Amino acid sequence: MDRLERQLGDQAELIRVDLMSSMGMELARRYGVRVSPTLLVFDGMGKVVYSEGGPPSVQAIVDLVAGLALG
């Protein structure tokens, strides 16, 4: 468990995908992933509400997830 997972607690599920796997390649195509790492945040309906290429900002993600939970 890393820092982001600890800070999110049970507010969100963090899933890491290997872009070299067949599933990873399909997801990269589907969501337009161009760089690694890329972070995608989905709302409860499966809509991408945040996308960031490169190392993610932990605090920005925690704040976004908290905002979605309040939404």
Image (tube, rainbow, N blue to C red):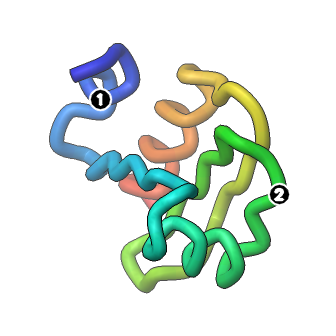
Q: Which secondary structure, mark 1? A: helix
Residue at left 66%, top 83%? Answer: 30
The residue most toward the left is 10
Residue located beneath label 1 in the image: 5
Residue at left 57%, top 80%? Answer: 26
Q: Amino acid at mark 2?
A: Arg
* Viewer-nearest residue: 58 or 21: 21
* Viewer-nearest residue: 38 or 41: 38
- Considering only vertical position in the picture, is 62 above or below 19? above
Give x and y (percent) for residue 43. Answer: 47, 70
Cβ atoms under marks 2 and 1 closer than 8 Å: no
Quarter of the image for the N terminus: give it: top left
* Viewer-nearest residue: 19 or 9: 19
Residue 34, disc: 2
Please tell me how crowded label 2 is: few (under 14), some (14-19), or many (20+) other residues with Cα within 10 Å.
Answer: few
Q: Nearer the viewer, mark 2 or mark 1?
A: 2
Q: Is residue 35 left or right of residue 49?
A: right
- Considering only vertical position in the picture, is 60 above or below 17? above
CA distance separating discs 2 and 1: 24 Å
